[in-house]
Image (cartoon, rainbow, N blue to C red):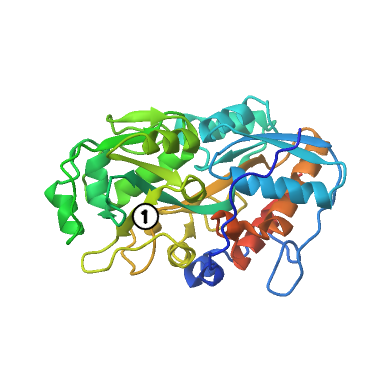
Amino acid sequence: MKTKRSGALFSTLVVGALVTGSSLLAACGTDNNNATGAGTSSSGAAAKPDCGGKRSLKASGSTAQKNAMDRFVARYNADCDGFNLDYTANGSGAGINDFIGGQTDFAGSDSPLNASKGETERAKARCGGSPAWDLPTVFGPIAVTYNIPGVTDLALDGPTLAKIFSGQVTNWNDRSIGQLNPGVTLPDLAIAVVYRSDQSGTTDNFQQYLTAAGGGAWTKGAGKDFAGGVGSGGKGNDGTSTILKQTRGGITYNEWSFALNAKLTIASIVTSQGQPPVKIGADTVGKAIDGAKFVNATGNDLVLDLKSIYGSKAGGAYPIVLATYEVVCSTYADKDTGKAVKAFLTVAINDGQTGLDTNGYAPLPSALKDKLAGAVRAIS
């Protein structure tokens, strides 16, 4: 079954800032595993896939990249006639479990494989002894969304969000919120935290942000399970969006494209005292991606070090950025599967990038695309 294209199109995003970040370009230089000529480079046209292998791939995982995957699949169908991918958006945790259990050919996850939880070794075993790679293919910010009657312009910062999502700040007229919002009349209304009840890479990334930017107020750690200990849970971005709309005083976190689709009210983020609140947008996300680096300088396991983004105090940079990884085998026991996965990802990082900005995603900067192309080319 082919996935169908879903979600509203948003044509007002400006993406120029997303393709020129100096720090990310420096971080994305080639390593000794990468040859030249694959992908879209500064000197060549988009690579075309070597279509072949398994005709029907299966993948599952991140709901945050669902709309992007719809585009990738449609492009794959067009570029590789007779080949298809069936993607199930069931959450990052479920996607990793499906992949490790051999039910799918790769996973989509908003967090890389977690070595401390044994995911790295189990994935290696699933791949027949070859390591699995984390390939960051889809970028989108996490929106902090809220439902406060009469309030349409709200600013929050890392410490205040950490206190809200851990139950330390419980009312919207709390002084700490008021100080961030001079001139805004905040109601005497209880704060109702809404969180992801399923295992979610969006939750993991949001909690990593609270850890980095919370000024010590968040002591719960990170991970795919929400650890705040307060509120009510909803499954997936759709579930949290639905609950938020029905809950006066509610607050949650959503992948941006889902917040746009659901027409949720989005908070601005204060990153540094004295700096104006930063609204979520293509240009502000681009400034944040400028600070991205890789955990490992070499190799094809392209795990991003996002601590510098989450804790960034750079003016005009929206700091809560989510990267979705495609988790793949470096070498597949079934060569037909490896060939088809390589073809699909070649499409995803090249032709599939066209139009992503209209769904609230950041198209890949050219240097990162080159880095990914080398890793995709190395899949066998």
Q: Quadrant of residue 185?
A: bottom left
Judged left or right of residue 374, residue 312 is left
* Residue 134 visible in this rendered orientation of the protein: no
Q: Is residue 15 above or below residue 112?
A: below
The disc labelled 1 sits on which kind of residue? Tyr
Picture residue at 62% right of the left edge, 39% below the top: 132
Residue 133 on image: x %, y %: 61, 44
Picture residue at 28% right of the left edge, 29% below the top: 229
Picture residue at 19% right of the left edge, 39% below the top: 189
Relative depth, front residue between 277 and 222: 277
Q: Is residue 128 above or below residue 29?
A: above
Judged left or right of residue 346, residue 156 is left
Residue 283 on image: x %, y %: 47, 68
Q: Secondary structure at mark 1?
A: helix
Judged left or right of residue 214, residue 337 is right
Query: Please, which residue is most extreme toward the front here?
Result: 150
Mark 1 lies on residue: 310
Relative depth, front residue between 2 and 337: 2
Query: Please, which residue is most extreme toward the bottom here?
Result: 43
Q: Quadrant of the N terminus?
A: top right
Residue 131 on image: x %, y %: 63, 39
Q: Quadrant of residue 55?
A: top right
Q: Quadrant of residue 148?
A: top left
Query: Please, which residue is most extreme toward the left here?
Result: 175
* Residue count near mark 1 (Cα–Cα under 10 Å), binned few <14, some 14–19, many ≥20: many
* Residue 319 visible in this rendered orientation of the protein: yes
Picture residue at 24% right of the left edge, 41% below the top: 164
Residue 53 on image: x %, y %: 85, 40
Q: Quadrant of the C terminus?
A: top right
Q: Is residue 213 above or below residue 102?
A: below
